[in-house]
């Protein structure tokens, strides 16, 4: 099989892949919703399709962070960024807020609120740290 060198064909191929991925995602989401309606939410969350859906969407979001960092840098002149310790405050605030919401809605299990707050903190910290790293790397590459 020959490699495609024409940029127009590459763009059409990427568009086709995007359409196929969107169709696949909508199909998996429809199956999960059908399972939740017919068998209950517990069966939908226990389904391996739920894991596939979450994994593929997380992978897509992580891969898109690099693209959004490049677009952000080229669209506007970036002012001096926040230091990393200031960026840590945002995920901490989100984790505390979600932990409080969980605690106020379910007072019988305070450990679940701690777990929820910690999971939100770690997830937001990972995405904010990756974005900070990509911005810093882009800034160093442009400065050299």
Image (cartoon, grey):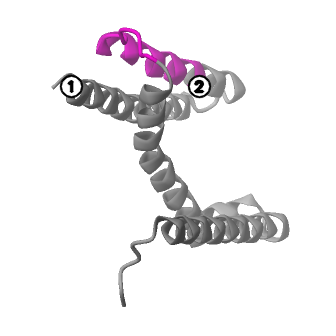
Residue 88 covered by magenta stretch: yes
Magenta span: 77-98
In this view, the residue in front, 141 or 22, is 141
Q: Residue at x 46, y 22 (%)?
A: 91
**Residue 79 appears left or right of 58:** left
Relative to 7, residue 121 above or below: above
Please tell me in which quadrant of the rendered image residue 28 appears: bottom right
Distance of label 2 from label 1 (alpha carbons): 35 Å
Image location (x, y in percent) of residue 106: 68, 30
Disc assigned to residue 121: none
Q: Nearer the viewer, residue 118 or 111?
A: 118
Of 58 and 6, the residue lying toward us: 6
Q: Are marks 2 and 1 in contact (CB under 8 Å)?
A: no
Q: Quadrant of the N terminus?
A: bottom left
Residue that label 2 marks: 98
In this rendering, position of residue 30 left or right of residue 13: right
- Give how far across and how far down residue 121 sits, in percent: 44, 28
Q: Nearer the viewer, residue 138 or 21?
A: 138
Per the image, label 1 sits on a secondary structure element best described as: helix
SS at mark 2?
helix
Report the residue marked by disc 1. Answer: 140
């Amino acid at each position: 099989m020959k490699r495609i060198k024409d940029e127009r064909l590459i763009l059409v191929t990427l568009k086709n892949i995007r359409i196929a991925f969107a169709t696949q995602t909508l199909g998996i989401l429809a199956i999960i919703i059908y399972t939740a309606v017919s068998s209950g939410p517990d069966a939908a969350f226990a389904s391996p399709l739920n894991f596939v859906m979450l994994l593929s969407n997380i992978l897509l979001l992580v891969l898109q962070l690099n693209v959004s960092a490049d677009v952000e840098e080229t669209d506007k002149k970036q002012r001096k960024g926040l230091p990393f310790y200031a960026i840590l405050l945002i995920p901490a605030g989100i984790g505390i807020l979600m932990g409080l919401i969980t605690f106020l809605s379910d007072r019988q299990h305070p450990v679940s609120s701690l777990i929820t707050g910690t999971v939100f903190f770690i997830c937001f910290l990972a995405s904010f740290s990756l974005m900070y790293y990509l911005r810093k790397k882009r800034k160093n590459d442009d400065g050299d």
